[in-house]
Image (cartoon, helix red, strand yellow):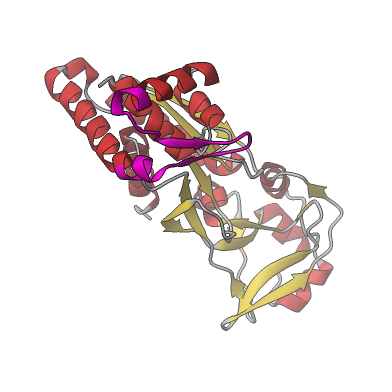
Amino acid sequence: MDMKDVGVLAAIAAAGSLSGAARRLGMTPMSVSRRLAALERELRVRLIHRTTRSVSLTPEGEAFLPYAQTMLEAEEAARATLSPEASGARGVLKITAPAVFGRTVIAPLLPQLLAEHPALKVDLNLSDNIVDIVGSGIDVAIRIAPLRDSNLIARQLAVNPRVLCASPQYLRLNGTPVNSSELSRHACLLLNGLQHWPFMAGQQVRSIRVEGRLSSSSLEGIRTACLQGLGLAQLTYWDVHEALAAGSLIEVSLDDVQPQALSIWALLPTRRYIPLRVKVFLELLGNRLNRF
């Protein structure tokens, strides 16, 4: 049995489509289709239902998939054991993450990750937009937001509370608000289209309307404007942890409300087969986040 054919089946199951599997594997859809057909001929069963819009595993495919994943993991482990230069994770690790978090937290981890896994490549997509990870062949998406219901597998990595903050210069010139009612007299830095900031009043979410002269389509723009002394911003801890530690931003605490707690999530396309390249990345990232 050709293990490349087996790998194609696992990729199709993870991606939910032949084209998604092709992007994940760096192959053409035609090559993916041919390898799947070769595996089905060898096993003498149909493994995948194909339609013009989607694919799904047949009952035989569902039954065979765990064995396929075990074979792939065993092959990977065998290669690492017999070939020292091939030890560790292999292939292309495709990650998508919010821009600020990716730049300040994930990017600094990449030298260690690549040094420990010489056969690994990384494709890092930094965007504040929601990316279709299945359709784009992404291995793992890092998200910092309340999660919507979906078919993706979510794994919580760390807490990430919202932080109300401003530069020392801004607070020196404009004073420090002590409760939520005083926010109305401050310049608040807003994401485009969002006029309310969420806080917690006890166990209840309280949405407070704020005003400001500057808005941005990106968190990076808000963070930069805040560092420049242009107003108050509501960001998350891991977006501003370096600035808070350096004193270039100051956390502002209000008497009547508290920041809303968020979490950092890893979203995976499937729980059926998690490649070693994803496991080692999430372990490294989790260790970094939970040091604080």
* Residue 263 percent location from the top left of the image: 50, 59
Give the quadrant of residue 34. Answer: top left
Of the 4 image quadrants, the one containing the N terminus is top left
Magenta stretch holds residue 48 = yes
Residue 28 is at least partly visible in this image = no
- 24 vs 19, nearest the viewer: 19
Segment tinted magenta in the rendering = 40-63
Number of numbered markers = 0
* Residue 113 percent location from the top left of the image: 35, 30
Q: Residue furthest right?
A: 213
Q: Residue furthest left?
A: 82
Q: Residue furthest front?
A: 44
- 88 vs 100, nearest the viewer: 88
Of the 4 image quadrants, the one containing the C terminus is bottom left
Residue at point 29%, 37% (across, down): 69
Residue at point 32%, 44% (across, down): 283
Relative to residue 132, is residue 74 drawn left or right? left
* Residue 285 percent location from the top left of the image: 38, 43
Relative to residue 62, is residue 178 drawn left or right? right
Residue at point 73%, 50% (across, down): 229
* Residue 53 percent location from the top left of the image: 63, 37
Magenta stretch holds residue 46 = yes
Residue 52 is at least partly visible in this image = yes
Residue 193 sits above or below residue 112 on the image: below
- 250 vs 146, nearest the viewer: 146
Residue 291 sits above or below residue 54 on the image: below
